Every structure is written in structure tokens, then in C-alpha cells.
Amino acid sequence: NAGVTQTPKFRVLKTGQSMTLLCAQDMNHEYMYWYRQDPGMGLRLIHYSVGEGTTAKGEVPDGYNVSRLKKQNFLLGLESAAPSQTSVYFCASRRSDRGREKLFFGSGTQLSVL
Amino acid sequence: QQQVKQSPQSLIVQKGGISIINCAYENTAFDYFPWYQQFPGKGPALLIAIRPDVSEKKEGRFTISFNKSAKQFSLHIMDSQPGDSATYFCAASIPLADKLIFGTGTRLQVFP
């Protein structure tokens, strides 16, 4: 049982390049999330999805796009990377809309934008 | 109203000591308060959680104390060990919420 898997684990981009981060979960969870983690800023929600084919904006959505074409996958795209997007990105998932449900996190993607 | 304020940002404790991390909130609709633990290079993982109908919850060396009237809750780590060195996040949510509201995190270092 792999849980939440993120690829790639590390990536270096030049300003203006694009890339896609992939999150896959094998727990049949409805809800999926993308967070970024920066020193002193905690976990900030970028976008999330409450089910296949749905997406919604979080706290810091600018510069990112997402897609949830399959229930098990949640993709985070950067169309034109900027140095301010240098961060550690975490994907998470949970089973349902109950607020008390446990979040399962992936191990993160370290992204550097030069 | 949707914020959860966490302090301190960093904490250094000697082995065997008590680590205390505090969180405060404004939204009285919050009804679930989890703590997540994150080791370096890993994603956060649920450590312990409490609902507002109890004032304390204990799991091993970890205890959440909850003060509903003050709108504060805290994590106490008794007999802190070097293996407890991690970043701790408090969080809160309302019933049927789409998402958790996270605090900004506390980096705990426990020295032998």
C-alpha cells in the first residue's frame, strides 16, 4: 500500500520554464490537496479537489493550475516558473468531506527556480 | 477569523524536558483540532487530535490541552526525546469542511 506518491522528488527549473507535478493516491480518496511549505509560513493551500473532475482555489493559487481527470491523480502545473515558486510542495488526500478526516501526505517535491 | 496562530516558531528542549507548543483561534465554529508531526524530508503525519467537548487528550507522552473559553489549545510532549525533533503543526476545521486550517509550524529540537 503506497499511500500518496509524488513525482518528481526534486526538480530545478529556470525562470519561465513549465513543469507538472504528479500526485497519485491508491486509497480511493475523494479529496486531494496541493500545499506549499516555506520557512516561517507553514503549509499554504494552493488548490484542492473534492472529487474527480473538480478543482477549487486555496490560499495561494496564482501562478498554478491543477487538474483531476482521474480520481487517483491530482496534477499541479506551473506554466511559467518564477523564483518565488521555489518551495517544497506537498500533496495530500483524505477520504471524505467530514472535517475530522485524517489527511495523508506525500513525501514532497523540492522545487528550485533559478 | 479563519486563522490559527501558533507559537513559538522554534523551540529547543533538553532531553527529558517538557515541550509545549501553543495555538490560538478566533472562529468558534471550529470543532476539530489535530496536530501533525513532520520529520525532515517527510510529509506531515497526524499525531493526535481533540474535539472541543473534552479539555484534554493524552496518547503516550503527547497530550493536547484544550481551553474552549480562551480559544486556545496546546501540545505538551512529556519526557522529550531526540527522536521527537520535528516540525509540529496545529490545525483546525469546522464541521463538513473542505479543508484544514494550519498554523505556521513549530520546529522542535531536543538535545541529549
Image: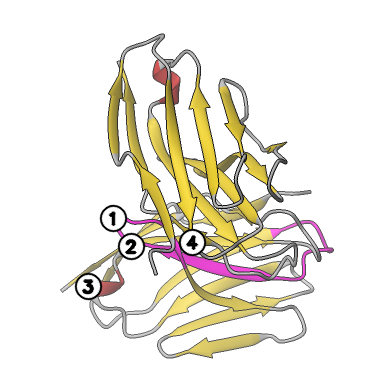
Q: Secondary structure at mark 3?
A: helix
- Is B53 situated above or below B73? below
Mark 3 belongs to which subunit?
B
Check disc 3 and report the residue beneath it.
B82
Residue sitting at x 37%, y 10%: A15
| Image location (x, y in percent) of residue B47 | 47, 74
- Colour setting: secondary structure
| Image location (x, y in percent) of residue A20 | 44, 29
Number of numbered discs visible in the structure rendering: 4
Q: Secondary structure at mark 1?
A: loop
- Range of residues picked out in magenta: B25-45
| Residues at marks 4 and 2, CA–CA distance in whole angstroms | 27 Å
| Callout in the foreground (3, 1) | 1
Check disc 2 and report the residue beneath it.
B86
Q: Secondary structure at mark 2?
A: strand
| Callout in the foreground (1, 2) | 1
Mark 4 belongs to which subunit?
A
Mark 2 neighbour class, 10 Å CA radius: few under 14, some 14 to 19, many 20 or more: some
Residue sitting at x 55%, y 43%: A74
Check disc 4 and report the residue beneath it.
A26
Q: Are marks 2 and 3 in contact (CB under 8 Å)?
A: no
Mark 1 neighbour class, 10 Å CA radius: few under 14, some 14 to 19, many 20 or more: few
A80 and A25: which is toward the camera: A25
